[in-house]
Image (spheres, grey):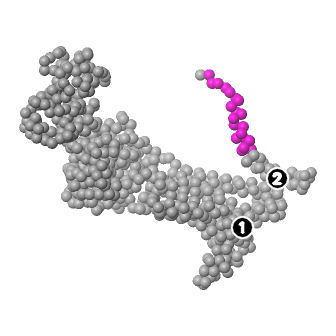
């Protein structure tokens, strides 16, 4: 068979190349460019090799925020994934209540990050906030602005409030996709509610859970606005996460070189962890 | 082991049914005897699956009672009914191995592991699944999965009946035959009541001792495959069973029999009397294509019909005739000469059925 060779078709791919170049490759290369140079002004720039990387990787301030970041993302996943599944399991399946619950769940997802931060900033205030003053009135000493633990709990609760809905909605759609006949077979087999969850619902939810875990990991690992508005990273550095550290470095101190190196490391960490999650979840029950 | 009895059973999916057309199952009484192999045959949407789900308890009937061994089980959930059901699409627990799948119903009962081990191996042997026991269920082929779902029903000691809801729909044709034989063997071996829902008459007649034909939410005939073929008690059975189905011609009573257009069909005196005594709106005669007699040469007793079309199906031929405007299918053995232009045919009296308002008119001898 003679294959017709027509290389003109490559021109059709050009728009995609251009789009990807402008949206991803060029900005990223700019960062790479910064990360290997020390730039003072237009005319005086020095190639420094891996210096910035070495400096960034040895910086204890970054170690601290990286650790905080991992603890934070870990907590977010540990709370939001099980809670989201639990909510999805208890949601009404059809009728008016179902629509109502769906709308209520969707509301937090529609609120912009800095508004969420502001809501909780006011809500949690010990003097005038409903939550803060109620807790104090009940005799619980609560102040997120001065107590590290309170600040952490507030930031976590805020994230749970904002994003558990996403997990719940994803799981709900996953549950709706399970054919009725599985439940019928399970009833005939006298499966307990736990067995139905363990052997039917959970395995069938795997693909949506993968998406939920990845989205929640990436988002929480890059969190910036909400803690920034709520606690400003404090008290002290207690709630200063990676992106805030990065912003301080890049905008506050204008250390563009180290900040660029840090950005790339940050990006690689997210990529690596996401890949780990993906591989772990897709190969957890490899073919036998 | 159980006899399943349905009493005044009816079901409607609408909460306030106004007429018979709102019912998926119209009021019926029926008995499935202990240890029988039954088929429930009917076209899509006739209520077969609804009936099956009512028996297994997945669906609660809007009227009437289901009895297992004369004990009313309406209030019992499927878990408590000692019934196994195999569905159209194979249901396996993906993440478990075949062994765990088969052990699942036993573990849910809290049976001890040693006993589970013996039972599972026993059933795996019956179903030829031993080689697959340690494989994950998700990697099986459709027919293997279906065998696993059957196995989950068979593995339980307490199962009194197994219900099959078109279990071979997704199976390759050459495996269908094998699985059907397997089912038959299992039936003989375990002496369990089996009800097999299908819309395939061949599947029904190879599996079952007795077939219930369902039409419009009712069981219109319950009998052996041979009875269904030879004496369909409803025109639908005549039409649905057999390939091609029964010839049905609308007729009017005439002196000495019935007739249509220019054709007269003589009937026995007893049958004429029966027709005269019954009340009906439409009267039809039916005859199977296999039973139409074709004469080799013109003959005085024969009716003349025009040959419209002949289909050669290899081992036999199907002739389409025109008998005074009524279309007529005739099955002709391969070695018989094919009449050209005009065919000389007659209807043997014993195979000519009379239907008043679609139901068979019978004359007691």
| Disc assigned to residue A118 | none
Marks 1 and 2, how far apart at CA = 26 Å
Position of the N terminus of chain B by quadrant: bottom left
On whether residue A11 falls in the magenta region, the answer is: yes
Q: Position of residue A53 (x, y in %)?
A: 79, 56
Residue B157 showing in the rendered view: no
- Residue placed at 62% from the left, 61% from the top? A110
Give the percent coordinates (x, y) of residue B347. 16, 26
| The one of A132 and B114 positioned closer to us in this rendering | A132
Q: Residue A9 placed where, x, y %?
A: 68, 31
- Residue B92 horizontal side relative to residue A167, left or right: left
Quick check: A142 left or right of B250?
right
Q: Nearer the viewer, residue A180 or B262?
A: B262
Chain where mark 2 sits: A
Q: Is residue B67 above or below residue B256?
A: below
Q: Nearer the viewer, residue B116 or B286?
A: B286
Which residue is tagged 1?
A228
Q: Quadrant of residue B231?
A: top left
Q: Which residues are magenta?
A: A2-21
Q: Secondary structure at mark 2?
A: helix
- Subunit ID for the residue under disc 1: A
Q: Earlier in the sequence, mark 1 or mark 2?
A: 2
Q: Give the quarter of the image for residue B14.
A: bottom left
| Residue beneath the point at 39% across and 61% down | A192
Q: Is residue B313 above or below residue B68?
A: above
Q: State left or right for residue B319 relative to residue B169.
A: left
Residue located at (26% from left, 60% from top): B73
Q: Which residue is mark 2?
A: A34
Residue placed most toward the observer, A24 or A103: A103
């Amino acid at each position: 068979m003679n294959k017709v060779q027509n290389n003109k078709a490559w021109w059709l791919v050009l728009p995609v190349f251009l789009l990807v170049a402008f949206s991803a490759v060029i900005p990223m290369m700019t960062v790479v460019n910064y990360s290997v140079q020390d730039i003072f002004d237009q005319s005086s720039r020095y190639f420094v090799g891996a210096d910035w990387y070495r400096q960034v990787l040895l910086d204890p301030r970054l170690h601290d925020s990286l650790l905080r970041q991992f603890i934070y993302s870990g907590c977010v996943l540990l709370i939001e994934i099980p809670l989201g599944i639990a909510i999805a399991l208890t949601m009404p399946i059809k009728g008016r209540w179902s629509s109502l619950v769906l709308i209520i769940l969707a509301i937090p997802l529609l609120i912009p990050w800095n508004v969420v931060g502001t809501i909780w900033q006011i809500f949690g205030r010990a003097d005038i906030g409903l939550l803060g003053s109620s807790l104090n009135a009940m005799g619980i000493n609560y102040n997120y602005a001065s107590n590290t633990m309170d600040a952490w709990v507030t930031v976590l609760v805020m994230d749970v409030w904002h994003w558990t809905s996403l997990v719940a909605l994803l799981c709900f759609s996953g549950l709706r996709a399970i054919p009725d006949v599985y439940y019928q077979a399970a009833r005939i087999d006298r499966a307990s509610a736990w067995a139905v969850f363990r052997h039917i619902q959970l395995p069938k939810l795997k693909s949506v859970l993968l998406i939920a875990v990845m989205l929640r990991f990436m988002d929480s690992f890059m969190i910036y606005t909400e803690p920034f508005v709520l606690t400003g990273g404090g008290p002290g550095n207690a709630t200063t996460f990676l992106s805030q550290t990065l912003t301080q470095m890049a905008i506050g101190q204008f250390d563009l070189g180290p900040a660029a190196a840090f950005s790339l490391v940050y990006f690689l960490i997210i990529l690596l962890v996401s890949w780990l999650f993906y591989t772990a979840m897709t190969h957890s029950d490899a073919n036998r | 082991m159980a006899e399943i009895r349905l009493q005044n059973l009816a079901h409607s999916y609408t909460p306030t049914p106004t007429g018979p057309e709102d019912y998926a199952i119209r009021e019926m009484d029926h008995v499935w005897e202990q240890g029988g192999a039954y088929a429930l045959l009917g076209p899509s949407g006739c209520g077969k699956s609804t009936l099956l789900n009512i028996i297994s308890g997945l669906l609660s009937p809007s009227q009437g009672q289901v009895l297992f061994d004369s004990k009313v089980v309406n209030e019992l959930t499927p878990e408590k009914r000692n019934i196994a059901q195999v569905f159209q699409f194979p249901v396996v627990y993906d993440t478990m191995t075949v062994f765990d799948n088969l052990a699942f119903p036993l573990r849910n009962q809290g049976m001890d592991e040693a006993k589970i081990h013996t039972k599972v191996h026993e059933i795996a042997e019956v179903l030829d699944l031993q080689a697959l026991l340690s494989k994950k269920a998700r990697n099986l082929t459709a027919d293997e999965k279906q065998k696993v779902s059957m196995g989950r029903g068979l593995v339980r000691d307490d199962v009194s009946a197994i219900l099959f809801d078109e279990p071979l729909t997704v199976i390759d044709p050459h495996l269908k035959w094998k699985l059907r034989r397997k089912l038959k063997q299992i039936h003989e071996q375990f002496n369990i009541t089996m009800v097999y829902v299908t819309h395939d008459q061949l599947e029904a007649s190879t599996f079952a001792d007795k077939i219930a034909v369902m039409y419009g939410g009712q069981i219109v005939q319950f009998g052996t495959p041979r009875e269904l073929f030879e004496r369909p008690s409803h025109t639908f059975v005549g039409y649905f069973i057999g390939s091609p189905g029964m010839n049905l011609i609308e007729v009017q009573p005439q002196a000495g029999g019935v007739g249509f257009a220019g054709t007269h069909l003589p009937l026995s005196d007893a049958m004429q009397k029966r027709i005269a005594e019954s009340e009906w709106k439409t009267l039809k005669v039916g005859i199977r294509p296999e039973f139409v007699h074709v004469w080799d040469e013109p003959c005085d007793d024969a009716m003349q019909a025009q040959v419209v079309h002949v289909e050669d199906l290899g081992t036999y031929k199907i002739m389409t005739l025109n008998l005074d405007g009524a279309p007529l299918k005739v099955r002709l053995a391969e070695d018989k000469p094919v009449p050209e232009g005009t065919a000389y045919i007659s209807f043997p009296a014993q195979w000519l059925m009379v239907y008043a308002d679609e139901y068979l008119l019978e004359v007691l001898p």
